Image (cartoon, rainbow, N blue to C red):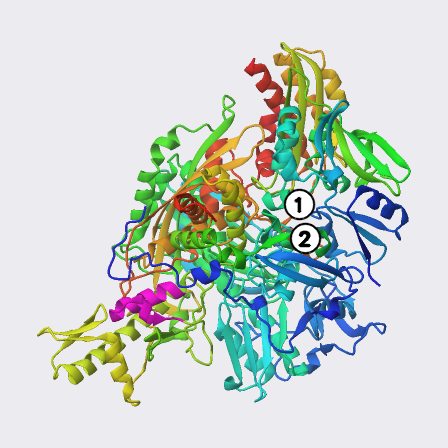
Amino acid sequence: MNTESAGEKGLGHGWIRRTWVVNGEEVSLSVPPLRRVLDILREELGLTGTKEGCGEGECGTCTILVDDRPVCSCLLVAAQVPDGSRILTIEGLSAMEEGRILEAAYVEAGAVQCGFCIPGMLMASYALLRRNGKPTDAEIREAIAGNICRCTGYVKIVEAIRLAAERIGRAPAGK
Amino acid sequence: MGVRVEIADTLQQALRLLAESEPPVRLLAGGTDLLVQWRRDPPDSGTVIVLGHIPELQVIEARPEGIYIGSGATHAALRDSALLKAKVPAIVTAASGVGGRQIQSTGTIGGNIANASPAADLAPPLLIADAQVVLQSVRGERKVPLDTFYRGYREIDLREGEMIVGFLVRPLEPGGVEFFRKLGMRSAHAIAKVSVAMRLVLEGRKVCRARIALGSLAEVPLRAEEAEKWLEGRELSRETIQEIGERVRAVVRPIDDIRSTARYRRWVAGNLVRGFVESLAAGD
Amino acid sequence: MVTVTRRGYIGLPVERTDAIEKAQGKAQYVDDLRRPDMWYGAVVRSPVSHGFIEGLDRDPDFDWSRVVLVTPEDIPGRNVVESLVHDMPFLASQEVRYRGEPVALVAAPTREAARAAAAAVKPRIRAAPSLTVPDDVVRIYKEGGELEYLWRQDIRKGDIERGFREAEIVVEREYRTGYAEQLYLEPQGMIAVPQEDGGVLIEGSMQCPYYVHPELCALLNLPPEKVRVRQTVVGGAFGGKEDFPSLIAGYCALLALKSGRAVKMVFDREEDILFTTKRHPSWVRHRTGLTRDGRITGWQVDFLLIGGAYATLSPVVLARGIIHATIGYRCDNVLIEGRVVRTHMPPSGAFRGFGAPQAFWALESHVDELAEACGMRPDEFRLRNAYRGGDTMATGQKVPEEYGGPAVLRKALEQSRFEARFAHCSRGSTLTDRWYGIGLAYFCHGAGFTGDGEARIKARAAVELAGGGEGGPLVVIRASSTEMGQGAQTVLRQIVAEALGVPIESVSYPLPDTALVPDSGPTVASRTTMVVGAVLYDAAVAMKKALEGFVSQQFFDGADCVLEEAVFRSGSGQAVDFERAVQDYLRTAERQQRFEAVFSLPPGSQWDQENFRGDAYPDYSWACYVAEVEVERATLAIRPIRVTAVLDIGRVVNPVLAEGQVEGGLVQGLGYAMMEKVGVRDGLFEADRLQTYIVPGVLDIPEIRITFLEFPYRYSGPGAKGLGELPLNGVAPAIGNALKHAVGRRIHDLPLTPEKLFRAIEERLVEQ
């Protein structure tokens, strides 16, 4: 626990207790109320798969799912996330069948270069595929319009999502 | 030391906290604007009230006096609302263009307006729907038309202890059509350098009612009232189409900044309005 | 479309080595690492652009009990960055030369505490006049006013006076580009860990471990063996992590040695944009003499780059810029005058292309203007003037009989149906809502270091035999080339596997660690696949020979054998498995396990560094882009709809990775062409975050069609040439030329925005 942060500028006075379901497991912690969920994941929970690219919601690198919705964890503080919220990070997605299919598709399509945007990209891809199993190219693009990749030029990322959608569609039902 | 943080789970609680907390008091909803500002300038005193999931602030529904949109409705909720799509479609178009999906998940309509930016994406579509801002405090409720709610650059008519709880908007009339277009520095996920919303109610080729609102074209989101009045009662003729762009250009007060130039903004605002009117004329 | 020759692993789209770990979020970037008892560092920066330091005040109300402060007096060794020109201190001690220049360092137990401590140190500085705004520099330069130059270099060929005497038409134009930010998604970061022997271990995000290593030895006054530099997974670099990491590594090391603890420093995005290197802004004037039938008789280029407070890499950026300033076109009389101006801004530095994008923005815009001046189509003019075999370039370098240039040009024109599409242009017609335009750029990139750079570096790399076992590798690559997303790890493994004749799974390439790898030169200049790949190929061939000799003696009674597909086979059909042979081979310790090779330039290469005469690069990669754009009449919004890209990068080692480089470089180039812009205000970069520095998103990209034509590098086993930078070089002029075609007016300065287009055609639009 990082005691130094208590009462520090910008984090809010005191501590709040939060109980969330992170990647399927219940987690309880005491945190400064304005501590970013990104920092809690990375520093308190050791879930460093979620990366910080800009800190202001512009690059989508820190995308996680909260109650199935994609959000930027750099623009979300502990006090905004009520008890019982379900948080999914790349570590959790990785353990799921859809996650494995998505990862494999990204690797196969050559969609991974420096890799820094990729966890956020995968979270955004999954958020799309769980509500829309047969996305059009336009829908794929729209779903990752909030994610910046500086390496790939996006071509192979779009291909990877298309490939994953086909495979998830073909995979036996039941999650 | 440090700012106090309170979490409000009901509207009553939020209003009481607003009245009783140590000032300065700030309301944190989605946080997509505020948390960005706090990165550079974090609050160090007073109180932050975090608005939790408060059901009455999430409401989107048809009421006798109009369509009601709770201030806590997220851009995602606006984007996905069938009611809004049918009755105030420009709001849906604008909400779909706020940031990316991630920002749409958390950012709220109340926050978009309370942030008081002249570039607020939802301001023009609300203005053309004659939106009333519904404000509450422990003292009671107040309704203010959105166009007078904006007082000046980053200044709104929000009194101490008050919060925006929702917006009341006029549904699209029969024969009405809405238009929204935003230009940014890239195709998506960009702050508006120009935005235009219009609602025209037509009878045949005659314009019965006109609303034109503009973003990033003045120190506040702007309604082009003189241009609206000029347009009302006119036929969608060549002359009307020629003239309306100029009328709009005459009312805007754009500036040069990091995103665009005043001259371009003025010119393009006129073109977008003219283009919409032209497309209606051609479509008939 | 990819048409590449496959030869074993070379030409095979092998999946990336590092992709799965990255996709699972398991790859460890520097900010993901923690070391025991680690503190965080922060930088105290100058509040003014120029001035003289009179002292540092520490806020007396601040709690300094858990803070370590480092000032220039604490530096044990030399307070100067040793790169090309020794003019930049690690910490300014007397004069500050840009706003934000580091003057002191702090470390504290948390990031927040370190930042607060840095803010509580106030440098007292007597301010002096400063020069920060690129427009001011250009104005002063054109007025002939006084400027300080960080570097100058000219190139002369033939007789420029004569060139203009022979001219029937003279075209003179100026072209501008601004600052641009690499915007690697992973910000700069390092960790320094003090070692028991008084040395230091550096881990972090970098392109060039052997740039960091000697800098730290000099800074810390430590012998080479006491400084160890290890690369962590790098989240993009694009040149931005070429020289800058030496600074941040130095800061962490100074703090670590003074505090006796591990110290981490990771910039946030704002600090990263504000205070690390940018692409040099440029002003280039072309003055060109032509005959009426379109022959270039004389060519004079004034090439001005805006440097920054210190030279750092500016001399070599300028070198590449001027060499590429007229490249590709025949002309007997050339004068290119290059300058880099000193200002009071952070040093401009390396960014993919390294002077070439500025050169090609000017050149390829200008060539279109030349074509127009003599009434030719842009494609006709280029075909008429492109180098032919035996021609000489501006430096006197001889063009080989067969090279990729004309081939890529013809192929791109044919695939895009350029001639037909060029004919049906809208040229600003008022009858349509959207204007269509098509434009091309023909360009190249000198592969490897400029001039005798490769001869001086003598890149070394090695392959080592390992025990295998438990699925471990049998062969380990020892090279200092870094994986930063471009695919070096995968491609170099392919080359070694190919040279040896073993499966790629047998070959591993761990992240470089200066304690274990030789200096293969920096991972820059599009040199890794071509140069280090060539060296590793040779090293692997030596290893293969040694193993074949061993197996022949050990197993086949001296009969010759060949290693192929992981099996040694003799002429008489005997066979021994690779793994078994290696294990036998390693059983005796005296046998050579490590096979090292060194790069050498093509035979007969010559270079005169003073006069810039001779063979500027070992070889060149060539490309032609044809861009098609649409402009919406009502808003002048510019939409690139298609780019046809044909490239000769020599042998394509991995077609999927190569396509990825082209797509990525092309989209980065699109950002440079159309949206990326960093102004200067009060001595700071104005666009200092992602909300204001806009880079392309997925909805901004056009359809991209890629074709590779292979004209291999003749002096290496793999035959690959440079790829990394080439794809960015030609995007902006291709779009600019298409835009000119669409609207009938040319924009001479980047980026190409609707606002500039509006200004260029305002009168005409208002008349409508």
Could you tell me what secondary structure mostly forms the magenta stretch?
helix
Which residue occupies 55% across, 16% down? Answer: B283
Q: Going by the image, does C611 lie left or right of C98? A: left
x and y, in percent, of residue C68 in the image = 72, 78
- What amino acid does circle 1 point to? Thr
Q: Chain of mark 2?
A: A
Pointer 2 residue = A76
The total of numbered circles placed on residues is: 2
- What amino acid does circle 2 point to? Leu
Q: Nearer the viewer, residue C118 or C78?
A: C118
Q: Nearer the viewer, residue C479 or C67?
A: C67
x and y, in percent, of residue C198 in the image = 59, 88
Which residue occupies 34% across, 42% down? Answer: C412
Per the image, label 1 sits on a secondary structure element best described as: helix
User: Mark 1 packing: few (<14 Cα in 10 Å), some, or many (20+)?
Assistant: many
Magenta residues, start to end? C489-509
